[in-house]
């Protein structure tokens, strides 16, 4: 009964989404305010029905309703309650429902917090989001119904053991909120183009929303990387896998959009460009969904793709992106840029930022689609792996770092080289000095990659700090935007430091240890004390005990595990990790070897690996600070909107 | 005109993705096709010193199915194999890949045994010789001991009736 209720709710959500997508939009063009006023209640109804469907699916999971195919495939009676709740998005159907849930939540948020936006514009924005929601709901109902019934099964097939983990439980909702959040900026851009008024107003409305979406996406990506690090068992943190790339591309374009919105708002420049980026960031989110869900890129190990779904998403992608780009082609020529700026100015810096981020996104796209491309050109199916991405991304990152270090200190319109040298001379010197001196602390010479990476990170960090010092204000008087810029840039510097040091100075050893034997790595002695069998809720495990000492000091006792889940009988590796701000010690159990209780063990020393995610956290904080800037709150409270003519005057 | 450039790029991308949907990511050409089946001589799951080797199969058309008890995709395939073994004269050999003999035996006891014999490839050596990417995979070998076809991923009822059975028919007709 409950699953049918969920199914019915989903159909009603589709009806509401279609209503939201059509009626207020029609009303806004024909001056019918009663139709326009339908937008808010329709958005709320779409959310309520989607939520009901979502709650029904969760109920089916929690009550072990094995007459629902999706529950049979992704859950089991033995699964701990927490993972039953998070298992709802553990596979295709449920994660799509989560996607729609995120979209509906964003729509409601826009209708609640969009107070300062004129009713007509708000109605169009919500309509665009309704249309997107309708597309996805139709997709779910036609190809991926999570409520489909099967004859009652005695037991489910259990959630993929890799997904039975806290990190994974929280990171997909974050990612989805980020992906889908770019739909708000997209909807504002479309609404502005439909209205034919691409002034500074839409930019100001869209900006805080873009920030918040970007924060979610940043946290989602960082969380995914963290999860891969400790759960996949071999200590990697980024694999350039199509699924990861699918989240990185919208992030790169979203970052470009954040910066381009700043130029459009402050200076009225790059208007067409900003609109294009708003379309682009969301299009890449959709493309990511297509790549992940259609199976065009799945490896031989993912045997669960369905071409019917691929065709639907591709048609949807073609409709949404194609029509927006068509609209852009028609409207954008009206956007004559009025302002000007000199070569040495913040505008130039932000332009460089946009260009580099865009090139990065396309480089990732090319690498991700390369197997497809080479197959289409009959060259055979060739994948380009990490070597391609590392080779291409390193110089691009270096170029971006050069722009970033100077970026904040640059002045709008025009700057003087001499002034800039005065401000940035010291940070540059300090950065270079650190880059040359810090490697000595690790011993073993002066690797070029370490110097390059540290110089980039130092330049960004010290350049940004120099800018902050010159604000000549106490930190508690800084605006949200000031904090946002500083934290965002520092965060990237921290991540970059982590990437550099962990890439250059990690040490690893694959050794065979019997109980009592030890191995020394990077000055730490790892002694295997024993491996015993233990029993979890829904798995059996070998649990190792490994003592780590350094000289006379006992550092940690680690417990790496090798689990076999009862239902899926798939082995997973739970690494034993001793985390630290400056280094992680990482131990993973391999296979039992020989009769004497020996095991193959992988031991790793990973310096500064935490900085990767710490930097992500800082960036996210920066994005949040930017979104909370006072001027957006003022906008909301008073409903005070810059009239287009005034905005134009400002921009000129 | 330049504002139409993004649309143009997007149309090109769409074309590529459309072509991609028509291609099958599972069709990975195997260098083994048209070559003699790699030799192995491995202990049989049945035990009692029995051994399994492709060399013993000369003169027959047979299918090598690579599987393991830890592989969840194999479970969906298994029913297809059991049905296949019941209703046709297919000579099906299993290569039990990187598995525990006890687990493998228990699996067959529980889900049925479609195999004429199962070779135990505990360390995956034979799997490497055969170029196994992932489990499950199936290879069709003809009467002269030459590998003629490889199926990556689980066999489905459609691939069995649409591709595998006609191919076996054809190979049997070819004769030695």
Image: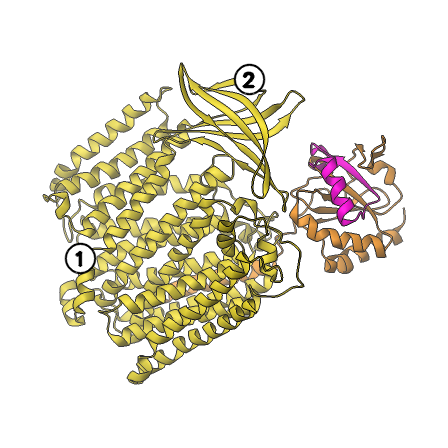
Chain colours: A yellow, B orange
Residue of label 1: A630
User: Toward which corner of the image does residue A461 lie, by quadrant?
Assistant: top left
At 26% across and 43% down in the image, what residue appears?
A: A489
Counting every numbered tag in the picture gives 2
Horizontal relation, residue B69 to residue A1: left or right: right
Q: Is residue A585 visible?
A: yes
Decide: few, some or many residues near mark 1? Use Cα within 10 Å; few <14, some 14-19, many ≥20: few
**Label 2: chain letter:** A
Horizontal relation, residue A95 to residue B96: left or right: left
Residue of label 2: A516
At 75% across and 55% down in the image, what residue appears?
A: B80
Horizontal relation, residue B89 to residue A223: left or right: right
Quarter of the rendering occupied by the C terminus of chain A: bottom left
Residue pushed farthest left?
A472
- If you read the primary sequence from the N terminus, does the residue marked by circle 1 or circle 2 appear first? 2
Q: Position of residue A345 (x, y in %)?
A: 18, 50
At 28% across and 47% down in the image, what residue appears?
A: A621
Magenta residues, start to end: B98-127
């Amino acid at each position: 009964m409950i699953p049918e209720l969920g199914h019915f709710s989903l159909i009603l959500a589709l009806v509401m989404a279609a209503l939201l997508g059509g009626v207020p939009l029609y009303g806004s063009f024909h001056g019918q305010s009663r139709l326009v006023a339908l937008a808010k209640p329709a958005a709320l109804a779409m959310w309520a029905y989607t939520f009901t469907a979502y709650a029904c699916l969760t109920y089916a999971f929690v009550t072990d309703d094995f007459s629902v195919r999706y529950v049979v495939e992704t859950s089991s009676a033995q699964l701990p309650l927490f993972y039953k709740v998070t298992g709802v998005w553990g596979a295709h159907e449920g994660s799509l429902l989560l996607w729609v849930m995120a979209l509906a939540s964003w729509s409601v948020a826009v209708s609640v917090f969009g107070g300062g936006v004129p009713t007509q514009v708000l109605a169009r924005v919500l309509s665009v989001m309704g249309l997107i929601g309708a597309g996805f709901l139709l997709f779910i109902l036609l190809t991926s119904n999570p409520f489909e019934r099967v004859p009652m099964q005695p037991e489910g097939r259990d959630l993929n053991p890799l997904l039975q983990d806290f990190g994974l439980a929280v990171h997909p909702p974050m990612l989805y909120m980020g992906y889908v959040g770019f739909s708000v900026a997209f909807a504002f851009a479309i609404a502005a183009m439909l209205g034919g008024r691409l002034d500074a107003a839409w930019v100001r409305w869209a900006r805080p929303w873009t920030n918040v979406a970007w924060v979610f996406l940043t946290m989602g990506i960082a969380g995914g990387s963290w999860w891969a690090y400790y759960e996949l068992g071999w200590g990697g943190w980024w694999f350039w896998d199509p699924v990861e790339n699918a989240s990185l591309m919208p992030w790169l374009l979203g970052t470009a959009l954040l910066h381009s919105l700043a130029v459009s708002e402050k200076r009225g420049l790059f208007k067409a460009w900003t609109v294009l980026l708003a379309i682009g960031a969301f299009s890449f989110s959709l493309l990511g969904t297509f790549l992940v869900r259609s199976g065009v890129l799945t490896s031989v190990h993912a045997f669960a793709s369905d071409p019917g779904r691929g065709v639907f998403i591709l048609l949807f992608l073609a409709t949404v992106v194609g029509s927006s780009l068509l609209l852009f082609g028609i409207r954008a020529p009206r956007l004559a840029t009025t302002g000007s700026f000199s070569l040495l100015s913040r505008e130039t810096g932000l332009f460089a930022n946009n260009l580099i981020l865009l090139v990065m996104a396309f480089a990732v796209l090319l690498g991700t689609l390369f197997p497809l491309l080479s197959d289409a050109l009959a060259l055979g199916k060739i994948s380009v792996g990490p070597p391609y991405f590392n080779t291409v991304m390193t110089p691009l990152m270096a170029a971006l770092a050069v722009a970033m270090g100077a970026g904040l200190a640059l002045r709008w319109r025009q700057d003087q080289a001499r002034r800039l040298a005065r401000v940035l001379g010291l940070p540059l010197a300090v950065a270079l000095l650190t880059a040359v001196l810090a490697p000595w602390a690790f011993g073993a010479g002066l690797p070029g990659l370490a110097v390059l990476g540290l110089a980039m990170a130092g330049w960004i960090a010290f350049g940004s700090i120099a800018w902050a010092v010159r604000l000549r204000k106490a930190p508690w008087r800084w605006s949200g935007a000031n904090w946002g810029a500083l934290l965002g840039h520092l965060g990237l510097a921290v991540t970059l430091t982590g990437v550099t040091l962990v890439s250059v100075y990690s040490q690893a050893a694959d050794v065979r240890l019997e109980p009592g034997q030890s191995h020394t790595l990077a000055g730490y002695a790892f002694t295997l004390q024993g491996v015993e069998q233990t029993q979890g809720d829904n798995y059996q495990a070998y649990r190792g005990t490994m003592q780590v000492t350094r000289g006379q000091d006992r550092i940690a006792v680690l417990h790496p595990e090798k689990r076999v889940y009862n239902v899926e009988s798939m082995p997973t590796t739970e690494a034993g990790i001793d985390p630290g701000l400056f280094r992680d010690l990482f131990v993973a159990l391999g296979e039992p070897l020989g009769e004497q209780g020996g095991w193959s063990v992988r031991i790793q020393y990973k310096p500064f690996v935490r900085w990767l995610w710490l930097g992500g956290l800082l960036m996210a904080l920066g994005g949040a600070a930017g979104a909370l800037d006072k001027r957006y709150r003022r906008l909301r409270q008073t409903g005070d909107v810059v009239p287009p003519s005034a905005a134009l005057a400002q921009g000129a | 005109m330049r504002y139409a450039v993004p649309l143009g790029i997007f149309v090109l991308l769409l074309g590529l993705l459309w072509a991609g949907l028509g291609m099958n990511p599972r069709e990975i050409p195997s260098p083994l096709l048209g070559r003699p089946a790699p030799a192995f001589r491995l202990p049989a799951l049945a035990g009692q010193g029995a051994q399994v080797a492709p060399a013993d199969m000369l003169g027959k058309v047979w299918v090598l199915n690579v599987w393991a008890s830890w592989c969840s995709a194999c479970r969906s395939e298994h029913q297809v194999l059991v049905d296949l073994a019941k209703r046709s004269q297919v000579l099906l050999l299993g290569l039990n890949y990187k598995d525990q003999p006890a687990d493998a035996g228990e699996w067959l006891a529980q889900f049925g045994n479609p195999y004429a014999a199962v070779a135990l490839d505990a360390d995956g050596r034979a799997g490497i010789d055969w170029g196994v990417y992932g489990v499950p995979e199936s290879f069709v070998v003809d009467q002269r001991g030459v590998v003629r076809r490889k199926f990556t991923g689980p066999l489905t009822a459609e691939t069995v009736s649409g591709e595998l059975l006609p191919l076996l028919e054809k190979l049997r007709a070819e004769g030695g």
